[in-house]
Structure formats: structure tokens, C-alpha cells
Image: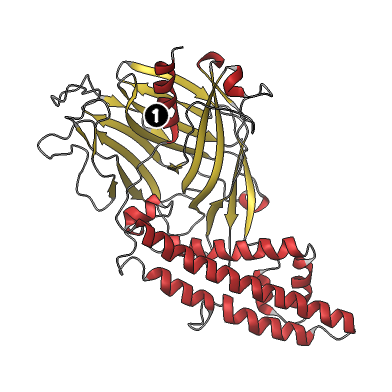
């Protein structure tokens, strides 16, 4: 395989996770505003957790009853975690986050680009996710400092600290989706299917539930760094894909009010007379900026447009924005590194990849390219390019409390331009939990 073909093939398969990432001039301001409030809240909660643990340890060392330590802990937790009190740290953080959108620091395009649920379809769900993530971060730090932390909070709750219940169990638990048969997808070009791929291993997601912050019949979904996917073999073993998960944000509905989501992602290869055939003007659509075509500077490519459709959810429906990186490694001694094994720390890939955020849903997902392969810019293209319409399957809400994700099916689809010897692609991806 010559180097140019490998470069273009790598780009094409790297597009397996490419998605719309709209950027505004003040994206940095939006990121700064969110991270500032999240970090402040996490620090205040962690400080309070540590004070509660210190008070417990002192009482035990002196042989004193725990009632006084429990009372002081309860009061301190109220000042930071009581969302119903306007003076609490968490309520103040919520107000600050809420002000970022009408204040102009964050647009829906900014939120989606940063991996947050846009407000047009999901309201302030991203804000509550940010608050829960701060609580989870503080809990994890407290637990790492003292493996007995959960037991301490249990004893303080029993001694009268009613607010200690927020830390007697983690806000989020890791649930593992063991990838079953049918997980994987295909990359489509105008002429047909370019390649198919299958995936095995585990997708780890944090499922979160915090009284007062999450609705009774709903779970928030988060995620952290994970290498649960096994190495993916492509093109008969000529190429390996190494998958790393970074974060996730979303929800699972178990009788709550959040919607079932369908996604359609469209990209216009050639914008003619200022008209992008994918842009609809719908408030439910987020589009990337237009760009100059990488193969023909006379052509303007439309930015990829993600349209989010909503409908009434069934029990177990879910929508997740998952930030993931696929690093492709050629099956050569140089690229696999000294240990000769792909997807290890000593790999030496010729083209390093970047992480991207993709929407996954238990609803439907599809992708398309307008004017596909229109390399001469006449606005006609080589033919239509559409993915299949993929359909997911809900989680079983009865099994979620025990950690099981069996039976769920998450799907996603997205377009890319000029990625294989000038060809456009529409990629399909399916995750099936067994």
C-alpha cells in the first residue's frame, strides 16, 4: 500500500468518529465559564466531605458520641449541596451556568462542540450534568484519600446527618456494556460499501442518580477515560483501529420527560451561489462553518449539519454524546512499535488522530452527502450518498439498578468529504450490549 493511499485511507477510517463540531469566536469563553463553576463547586464539596470525615475521626478518637459531628456535617453539607437553598454553593453554581447561554457566552453550537447537550432540545440538562459531575469528582477524591469514607458517611447519617445520604453511595456507578454480535458498522461511498468493521470488548459508562439533581425516573450518563474496546482489525488485518473513550454526556429515560432522539447529519460537498443544500434554518439544526475544499480550492464545502429530532420516549430510551478517539495503526513493524503489538504505548502511527464527539441514540440515526464526490464543482456530483437509517433499542430500566445494560442498542451515523482518493463517505456505527 503506497504512502499516499495509506494517508487517505487513514483519514477515511479515522472519520469513523468525525462529527459536526461548530466553533464560535467565544468558544474559549464558554469553556472557561463552565469549567470555572465546575471546579469551584467540586473544591467546595471536597472540602466539606473532608471536614465531615475529620470531625468523625476526632469524635471516635476522643470516644465522643457522633451526634455533634453529625450535626456539624449536616449543616456544612447544606451550605454546599442543598439545591433548594439559594445560598448554597451548588445553587449558586447552577445560577452561574444558567446565565452563560442568555448572557451570550455559550451558544448551542458551543455546547455541542464542547460535548454538552444543547439547550434547544434538552433545556438545562447539561447544567445538572455538570453539577453531578462535580459531586462525583469530589466523592472520588474523598474516597481515594480515605477508603473508609463511605462507611464514615453511613455512620454520620445514622447519627443524625440526613444530608450525608448524598455521599453514602457514589453519585455515579460504572456500568459495562459488553459488546455483542452486531456491534460495529460500515463505511459507505457512492459506489457502495467501502469496508465493514466489527467491534468487541466493553463500553464503560457512568450511570448517575442524585436526589434533587436528577428526576426520579431518569438517569444521567457520564463517562471517563476507558480502553474497553478490543483492537479492531480492518481490511483483512492490514490496518488496526485502537479505540479510546474520553467522556460522555447524556441520559436514560425511565419514565421521565426527556425525549427519544433521532439524528440526521448532512454535509453539502459544493455550496452553490451561497446555498448550502443541507441547511434548513431549523432551530433543531447545528452546522459547522463552511470551508474551502481540500482538493479543489475553487469549491466551498458546506459545514456538516446535525439535526436533532425529538419524540415521546419509551422506557429505556437514551441519548449520549460520546467523545472518543480512534487511532489507526498500519500492520507494519514500524507502526506497531518494538513490542510488535498494535494499540499499545509504543505504537508509532504515521498519522496521529484526534478525539471527536459523536451522538449515539436508541432512536434513529442517518447520514448523507449532497453533491457527493463533486470534485469539479459543477454542483451535480457522482450520485447520491446516504447511510442506512439505523434504529437503536432501549435499555431495560428494571436491570439498570443492578448494573446490567443487556439488550440496549445505540446507533450513530455521520458524513465525511474527500477522505478516500477524493471520495466522500457516510459511516454507520452500532453498539449492542449483551
In the image: residue 375, left or right of residue 144: left
Count of marks overlaid on the render? 1
In the image: residue 274, left or right of residue 67: left
Q: Position of residue 189 (x, y in %)?
A: 33, 21
Q: Position of residue 163 (x, y in %)?
A: 65, 77
Q: Position of residue 382 (x, y in %)?
A: 22, 19
Q: Quadrant of the C terminus?
A: top right
Q: How is the image coloured?
A: secondary structure
Q: Position of residue 334 (x, y in %)?
A: 59, 20
Q: Which residue is mark 1?
A: 427
Picture residue at 58% right of the left edge, 53% below the top: 207
Of 298 and 245, the residue lying toward us? 298
Mark 1 neighbour density, 10 Å: few (under 14) some (14–19) many (20 or more): many
Of 348 and 70, the residue lying toward us? 348
Toward the top, the furthest residue is: 1
Height in image: 207 above or below 181? below
Residue 265 found in image quarter: top left
Q: Is residue 312 visible?
A: no
Picture residue at 32% right of the left edge, 53% below the top: 109
Of 86 and 300, the residue lying toward us? 300
Residue 106 found in image quarter: bottom left
Provide the secondary structure element on which disc 1 rests. strand
Height in image: 332 above or below 346? above
Q: Is residue 409 visible?
A: yes
Picture residue at 62% right of the left edge, 38% below the top: 227
Height in image: 104 above or below 280? below
Picture residue at 22% right of the left edge, 38% below the top: 278
Amino acid at each position: 500500500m503506497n504512502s499516499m493511499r495509506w494517508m487517505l485511507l487513514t483519514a477515511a477510517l479515522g472519520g469513523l468518529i468525525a462529527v459536526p463540531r461548530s466553533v464560535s469566536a467565544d468558544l474559549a469563553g464558554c469553556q472557561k465559564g463552565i469549567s470555572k463553576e465546575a471546579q469551584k463547586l467540586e473544591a467546595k464539596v471536597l472540602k466539606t466531605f473532608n471536614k465531615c470525615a475529620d470531625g468523625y475521626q476526632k469524635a471516635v478518637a476522643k470516644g465522643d458520641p457522633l451526634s455533634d459531628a453529625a450535626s456539624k456535617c449536616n449543616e456544612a453539607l447544606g451550605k454546599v449541596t442543598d439545591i433548594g437553598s439559594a445560598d448554597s454553593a451548588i445553587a449558586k453554581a447552577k445560577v452561574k451556568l444558567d446565565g452563560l447561554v442568555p448572557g451570550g457566552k455559550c451558544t448551542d453550537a458551543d455546547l455541542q462542540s464542547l460535548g454538552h447537550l444543547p439547550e434547544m432540545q434538552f433545556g438545562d440538562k447539561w447544567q445538572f450534568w455538570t453539577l453531578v459531575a462535580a459531586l462525583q469528582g469530589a466523592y472520588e477524591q474523598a474516597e481515594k484519600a480515605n477508603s473508609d469514607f463511605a462507611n464514615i458517611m453511613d455512620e454520620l447519617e445514622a447519627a443524625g446527618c440526613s444530608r450525608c445520604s448524598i455521599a453514602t453511595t457514589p453519585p455515579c456507578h460504572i456500568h459495562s456494556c459488553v459488546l455483542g454480535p452486531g456491534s460495529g458498522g460500515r463505511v459507505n461511498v457512492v459506489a457502495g460499501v467501502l469496508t465493514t468493521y466489527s467491534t468487541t470488548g466493553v463500553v464503560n459508562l457512568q450511570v448517575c442518580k442524585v436526589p434533587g439533581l436528577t428526576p426520579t425516573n431518569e438517569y444521567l450518563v457520564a463517562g471517563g477515560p476507558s480502553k474497553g474496546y478490543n483492537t479492531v482489525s480492518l481490511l483483512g488485518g492490514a490496518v488496526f483501529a485502537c479505540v479510546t473513550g474520553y467522556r460522555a454526556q447524556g441520559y436514560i429515560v425511565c419514565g421521565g420527560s426527556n425525549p427519544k432522539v433521532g439524528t440526521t447529519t448532512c454535509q453539502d460537498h459544493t455550496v452553490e451561489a451561497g446555498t448550502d443544500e443541507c441547511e434548513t434554518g431549523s432551530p433543531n439544526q447545528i452546522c459547522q462553518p463552511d470551508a474551502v475544499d481540500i482538493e479543489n480550492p475553487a469549491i466551498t464545502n458546506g459545514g456538516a449539519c446535525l439535526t436533532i429530532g425529538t419524540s415521546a420516549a419509551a422506557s429505556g430510551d437514551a441519548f449520549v454524546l460520546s467523545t472518543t478517539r480512534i487511532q489507526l495503526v498500519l500492520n507494519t513493524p514500524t507502526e506497531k512499535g518494538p513490542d510488535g503489538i498494535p494499540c499499545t504505548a509504543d505504537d508509532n502511527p504515521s498519522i496521529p488522530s484526534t478525539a471527536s464527539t459523536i451522538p449515539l441514540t436508541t432512536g434513529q440515526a442517518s447520514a448523507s452527502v449532497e453533491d457527493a464526490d463533486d470534485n469539479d464543482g459543477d454542483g451535480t456530483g457522482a450520485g447520491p450518498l446516504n447511510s442506512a437509517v439505523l434504529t437503536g433499542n432501549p435499555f431495560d430500566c428494571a436491570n439498570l439498578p443492578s448494573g446490567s445494560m443487556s439488550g440496549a442498542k445505540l446507533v450513530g451515523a455521520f458524513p465525511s468529504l474527500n477522505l478516500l482518493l477524493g471520495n466522500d463517505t457516510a459511516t454507520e456505527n452500532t453498539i449492542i450490549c449483551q
